[in-house]
Image (cartoon, helix red, strand yellow):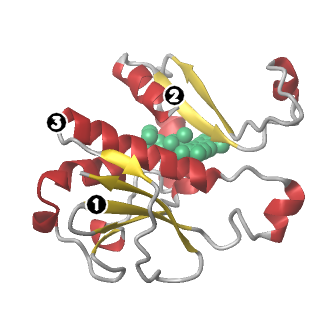
Amino acid sequence: MEHAILFATDLGLGTCWLGGTFSRSRFAEKIEVRRDEIVPTVTAIGTNAQSPQARDWIRERARGTDRLPAEQLFFEQQFGKPLLAVGAGAYAAPLEALRWAPSASNKQPWRIVRTENAFHFYLARTKGCGKGSLLFFLLQFADLQRVDMGIAMCHFELTARELCLAGRWVVQDPNIAKSDDRTEYIVSWFG
Ligand SMILES: Cc1cc2nc3c(=O)[nH]c(=O)nc-3n(C[C@H](O)[C@H](O)[C@H](O)COP(=O)(O)O)c2cc1C
């Protein structure tokens, strides 16, 4: 879906990820969602408003223009040891494109640990968000932080491919000691 959004952006269109539970709404009726289907997100798409002041005001209030610094997101061999830009080598650009990816409530839950031949992607869950949270279970909220991980993978992979960096996704937990019990392994990029 992020790939489609980037494509639309390239065409000069405006978009906005909308996250929530669309499976039981009137909108769900319109698109005929079945009982066993989940629609965690949809996107608005269209021509940008002429005067973006209102949108910019909301984005500023929601700190939508800020991103966490690289040293809090990318690590070398183990959590807690920041991956310096110079150490990232050819992958500095894919990591920077990932850093600027959008995420639900701008939480940026991705954490990446680089080892000799791979980048291991982890989801550092925001407290009370998703799996294990009673509120999420009871209200059947969509797991938007997993959607965020897909967006991060998309930015990373598209930039790597643009730079002709060959690689592939593999699910193979490297068993690196995690920073806390809200952090879970998702996938690795082997370059
Ligand atoms: C999974 C996901 C769900 C989102 N849900 C909403 C939403 O419900 N309402 C909203 O205004 N923005 C939502 N956003 C944020 C915006 O779509 C947008 O990504 C953010 O404002 C960053 O804008 P920018 O790409 O122009 O920097 C969501 C983003 C993601 C990734």
Report the side of 98 relative to 88 (left or right): right
Task: From this view, report whether residue 101 is shown above or below residue 16.
Answer: below
Give the mark, 2 or 3, whose residue is nearer the N terminus.
2
Residue 26 x/y as whole percent: 88, 27
Q: Which residue is mark 2?
A: 15
Badge 3 element: loop
User: Which quadrant would residue 43 be assigned to in this image?
Assistant: top right
Q: Are marks 1 and 3 in contact (CB under 8 Å)?
A: no
Instruction: Measure the C-alpha gap from mark 1 to mark 3.
Output: 16 Å
Instruction: Measure the C-alpha gap from mark 2 to mark 1.
Output: 32 Å
Badge 2 element: strand
1 vs 3, front mark = 1
Q: Residue at the spot x=35%, y=73% of the render?
A: 72
Q: Which mark is residue 118?
A: 1
Residue 179 x/y as whole percent: 46, 82
The type of residue carrying mark 1 is Ala
Report the side of 79 relative to 17 (left or right): left
Give the mark, 1 or 3, whose residue is nearer the N terminus.
1
